[in-house]
Image (cartoon, rainbow, N blue to C red):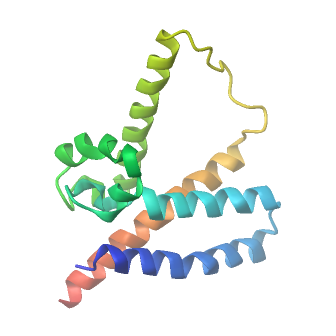
């Protein structure tokens, strides 16, 4: 299987091409382009399918917050559902959402006021761009694993 460095190298080498293609074909606003690119980089660097491993560079990139992924690698076995084309990204996003939700509950119980409504600028198109940006590196990672395993 490819190393974590190989996965990152492939994802980061393809990133400018994806961005240029999206820009060329849809002529988006710069904010949309930034959202797509930022989500892609976030997923490549911090939401790798290899978070299901005990020791991995992705978890180290989280720095002091890397501990939040310990339950994740205990729940998911390596190359199981976390490496699914359809559900891999979803498992990490749901998990991260649950962690974030617990933090919000904790802040709320401490008396911090939290926003009640979604921001006015958030719309369906931005959510789709966010989803594509978060999903695409997962697809590349899983496909690279599969291609290498076929030829090894």
Instruction: Looking at the picture, tell me which residue is in the foreground, 58 or 21.
Output: 58
The residue shown at (19%, 43%) is 75
- Where is residue 29 drawn, in percent x and y? 83, 60
Q: In this view, does 102 lie above or below 27?
A: above
The residue shown at (24%, 54%) is 52
Mark yes or no: residue 122 visible: yes
The residue shown at (44%, 57%) is 46
Mark yes or no: residue 84 visible: no
- Where is residue 123 drawn, in percent x and y? 72, 41
State the image quarter where residue 17 is shown: bottom right
Outermost front residue: 64
- Where is residue 74 drawn, in percent x and y? 17, 45
- Where is residue 45 drawn, in percent x and y? 46, 63
State the image quarter where residue 37 is shown: bottom right
Q: In this view, does 34 lie above or below 143?
A: above
Instruction: Looking at the picture, tell me which residue is in the foreground, 118 or 99.
Output: 99
Q: In this view, does 57 lie to the left or right of 97?
A: left
């Amino acid at each position: 299987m490819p190393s974590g460095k190989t996965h990152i190298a492939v994802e980061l080498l393809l990133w400018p091409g994806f961005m240029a293609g999206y820009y060329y074909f849809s002529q988006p606003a710069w904010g949309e382009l930034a959202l797509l690119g930022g989500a892609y980089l976030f997923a490549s660097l911090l939401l790798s399918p290899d978070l299901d491993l005990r020791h991995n560079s992705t978890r180290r990139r989280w720095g002091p917050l890397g501990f939040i992924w310990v339950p994740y690698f205990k729940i998911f076995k390596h190359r199981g559902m976390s490496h699914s084309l359809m559900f891999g990204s979803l498992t990490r996003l749901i998990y991260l959402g649950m962690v974030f939700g617990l933090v919000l509950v904790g802040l709320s119980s401490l008396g911090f006021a939290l926003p009640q409504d979604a921001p006015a600028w958030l719309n369906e198109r931005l959510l789709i761009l966010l989803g594509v940006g978060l999903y695409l590196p997962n697809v590349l990672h899983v496909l690279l694993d599969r291609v290498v395993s076929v030829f090894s």
